[in-house]
Image: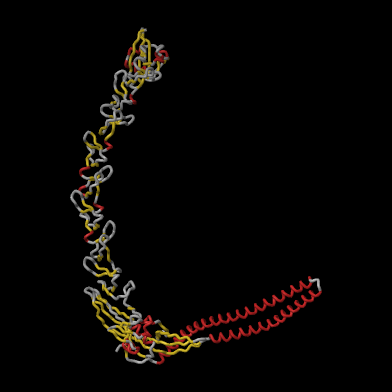
Amino acid sequence: MNFVERVMERIGAVRDGRVWRLPEEYQEEFGEALEDGDDYAATLIALRLPSFGVAEGQRDFVITCVNCREEVLSETVEHRHLLSIGVRVEYRHVRLEEEVLEFLYDPESRSLMEFSALKGLNLVDREGTIDESLIKDAMDALRGVVERRASEVERRALDEARKDVERVREYHERMIREEEEEIRGLIQKAEEYEKKMFLARKAVLRERYNRLRLKALEKATELMNALESKRESYRRRIEEYERREMERARVRADVHLEGAVLIRIPRIRRVVKFVSDDAERVEVYEYDHLRDMLSLKCKCGAELRDVYLTSSGLLVCPVCRRECAVCGKVMSIYEVHHICAACGATLCQEHSRRCSVCGKHFCDDHSVKCDFCSSVMCTEHASACSVCGATLCPDHLASCAVCSASLCPAHWKECALCGSNICKEHAVKCMVCGRTLCTECAVEVNGEHSCPEHVSRCGVCGVRGVNLERCAVCGAPICETHRAVCSVCGRVVCPEHGVACHTCGAVLCPDHTEKCIVCGVPLCDEHVHTCEVCSADTCEEHSHVCPVCGSTLCPDHGADGCVVCRGMRPVRAHPLIREIVRKYPYAAKGREWRCADTSRAVILATRVKNLYLVYRVEKATGEILEVRSRV
């Protein structure tokens, strides 16, 4: 017979299968029926019975090894004792109050516990007796609870007594107030009689009002004397009533032991080896049946009721467990593992592939390798060459700047100007320098392509051409049709800066063009006439040549006669005379020499008989020319 059966038998319960039908006195608190396994309710009922016994409390406890097995190396069991005690307390004061208190007494901490600590425990009867000293200690610990509850009962009783005393005090005070009102009414009447007495004309009336006045004052005095004695009597009565009620409200508590059961609760300590296919671990854990606490815990703090042993020998709970989706290796969240960013699969370090672009980890199904550098990347950041289909990473991928086609290093070309990558279809070569260009940078001229630097537009007609020559003056490009070449220096000039000589029509650049100071026509060096006096340039039409000295003069210096001839001065000796005589011996017969110095030449003249000899010595070349003139 177990604990529940023994308790049910003592209270007269009837068994119906696994249900006990309770007597009426227990139905209000526990219901009509009680399940066979409800040990907690059976313990509460047992405390109401004058019973003393020993029971053992256990829980259904098991550790499930999911991917491993458990080998118990050693086990020790210690018992913790709790005394379930029930007492009936009688609170005696104005009336009698009773209360049943039920507690658990813990001998280790010498403290009381609530009965809820026994929930979930399976109680089984055991042989043994309860030590009387243990019951005495429990009663001593319970005394403080009884005193606190008695104080509460006494506080309520004192509050009720004070309310009764206050009601009595209010009643007597009301009686006093009524008599005071009556006295004030008599005094008021006496004052009215006195006023009428003074107003009355007849002596009879005055005598009558005076008697009534004295009679009212006499009665008021009598009531006042009686009221003082009543007040003192009321005060003594209230004090006596208050003392008596306060004394009656004092509580005396009597404690009667109704029942006690000694409950032994085991505490198990085990040394266990957990073994799996690729790891093993030895652990020591304890289990307390009272608190339902297991010391075997996961790193996250959860109790390990369902145990997983990782390949590194770590015990984890189902929440912290991870399993590689490729090889099935058991891991924990505290070990190195990765999650595929695409499908969310858990991967061990060996089967995880890290993308070299985004740094995330992926499984084999969602990762590829570059065909050129073998770097791993996810399928999102991998590309394929549009020509050969090779798998490419971003470092070996190029997009055509024109058509955006994906290209591998073997099938892209680089534009020499913009540096962009281009495919074969959009790559051309410069007809001048042979560099590779994209169609965006290349310039097409007459069906051929060239670099922009080799192509320009004629500054005159705007026609585009390759390697056009530029004007030596303004730098504008000139096409073949509109270009001109200086006949003196050979430089190319544009029509704006190239002019034709007025005399011979030869093309000249600005550096080799002279202008007549009179008419302004352009002249070349061969057809320009420079005044030897002022160096002014003139055309043939506006220049003068002295027939005597051969000097070329401008209109200002030759129109009215040769200023050179007029400016000749006699000279006695001149270094050039000897040179003239050496070349022209007959000049030695000249008598007087005259000389004029121009910008271009030195003019020397002499007279021989009827001849006027004039010699011109060019300063630039030193050449001596003879000019003969008759007188």
Work out whether 320 lies above or below 480.
below
Residue 250 appears at what percent x and percent y? Answer: 53, 86
Q: Which quarter of the rendered picture does the N terminus lie within?
A: bottom left
Work out whether 68 lies above or below 7.
above
Colour scheme shown: secondary structure
Residue 327 appears at what percent x and percent y? Answer: 21, 67
Report which quarter residue 440 is drawn in.
top left
Report which quarter residue 80 is drawn in.
bottom left
The residue under the point 62% across, 85% down is: 237
Q: Which quarter of the rendered picture does the C terminus lie within?
A: top left
Residue 260 appears at what percent x and percent y? Answer: 38, 89
In the image, 165 versus 570, the foreground residue is: 165
Q: Is residue 389 visible?
A: yes
Q: Is residue 316 left or right of residue 210?
A: left
Report which quarter residue 553 is drawn in.
top left
Q: Is residue 593 visible?
A: no
The residue under the point 47% across, 83% down is: 149
In the image, 309 versus 302, the foreground residue is: 302
In the image, 225 versus 358, the foreground residue is: 225
Work out whether 246 lies above or below 471.
below
Q: Given the current orientation, which residue lies at the most extreme left position? A: 388
Work out whether 9 lies above or below 199.
below
In the image, 53 versus 301, the foreground residue is: 53
